[in-house]
Image (cartoon, rainbow, N blue to C red):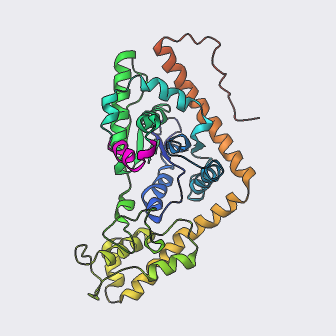
Amino acid sequence: MQTIMNRPIVFSGAQPTGHLTLGNYLGALRQWTAMQADHDCIFCVVDLHALTVRQDPVQFRERILDLAALFLASGIDPEQSVIFVQSHVPAHAELAWLLSTFTMMGELDRMTQFKDKSRSHAHNVNAGLFTYPVLMAADILLYGTHKVPVGEDQKQHLELTRDVAVRFNGLHGTVFVVPEPLVTGGGAARIKDLQEPTKKMSKTAESDLAKVMILDEPDAIMKKFKKAVTDSLGVIRDDEEQQPGVVNLLNIWRAARGATMEEALAHFSHHQYGRLKVETGEAVVALLDPVRRRFQELRSDPKELEGILARGADQAMERAERMMQKVLTALGVPLQGSRFPIREQGRP
Ligand code: TRP
């Protein structure tokens, strides 16, 4: 077994903006939880990032707690990993400022997500939307992160993080670890909309029938699968071109069951679509039902959840503070007695 010390450090984050889909579960959360065994994992609810878009404060608070509870319900274990809320650790915002002086306007201007978001939020193109990737770089670099599991859409931000780390290290000596992307989301990319199976399943899809949410009740899940769009060919084959709906159901069934396409075809090829839909629905219920139940337990006990997040913030803060001292020292800031002490243990 590897010791705690030499496990690679992993950092990932998700924004508390609304509920997550089956695609998010398979493509991100399930992969994160699987990494815990042999990595030193840090998982963060990135609430500061979410503030680049206007949030209703009452709803925002609930969404932050919801996402933290969903992380835990999906199997992130606070005994093994650090789980916390970004804004509880002030070093994220602080390092983002410092790193913004090592990030060029031209680099930020090239970010495709900024271009997309300034189009979709044309009434609120705030400076935070522009500097969003710098805050993300701070999240990652604060912890000496080796690997960052991200979806395809975040690869460009990770490239920028690497460039900023290399630039800083070049000017001030090796302070930051240059992180590697670990592109996950294979699952999410593969899971398609149940009504329009050529499109990726998205939490913003208009029709409720199109998407399975992690917290859907079993009845709702079964209904969505029974109404999933297939085709009129009447055979179950792995032919994405001709039968995207059928292939999507096969992919979901095998992702939920941990089976290969060969096994899925062997299991279903002599059956009709009805059977495929029902069994896929059942496999997804078996996967998500324990997550939903654990989520409800956690959300009904705010003290427990808040305690877990407070301990996580303490652990993160201690590690972040060590990095901040290195960064500030490298920049020439005299620190004697100026920073808050690093607590050895968690909260009293
Ligand atoms: N920008 C990421 C997203 O929208 C979320 C995020 C913020 C993140 N900080 C991070 C992901 C650090 C990985 C590492 O998906």
Horizontal side of residue 82 vs 155, given as left or right: right
Query: Was residue 94 drawn as part of the magenta stretch in this picture?
Result: no
Name the residue at the right extreme.
Answer: 348
Picture residue at 45% right of the left edge, 79% below the top: 225
Query: Was residue 122 drawn as part of the magenta stretch in this picture?
Result: yes
Horizontal side of residue 49 vs 341, given as left or right: left
Provide the residue span drawn in magenta: 112-124
Q: Nearer the viewer, residue 280 or 225?
A: 225
Q: Nearer the viewer, residue 348 or 79?
A: 348
Task: Establish if 53 lies above or below 251.
Answer: above
Decide if residue 61 is in sight here: yes
Count of marks overlaid on the render: 0
Picture residue at 63% right of the left edge, 19% below the top: 339
Task: Establish if 230 lies above or below 46.
Answer: below
Decide if residue 145 is in sight here: no
Horizontal side of residue 186 vs 97, given as left or right: left
The quarter of the displayed image where residue 252 is located: bottom left
Q: Ligand 1: give its quadrant.
A: top left
The quarter of the displayed image where residue 313 is located: top right
On the image, the x and y values in percent for residue 249 come to: 37, 75
Name the residue at the front extreme.
Answer: 123
Look at the magenta stretch and give its main secondary structure.
Answer: helix
On the image, the x and y values in percent for residue 340 come to: 66, 21
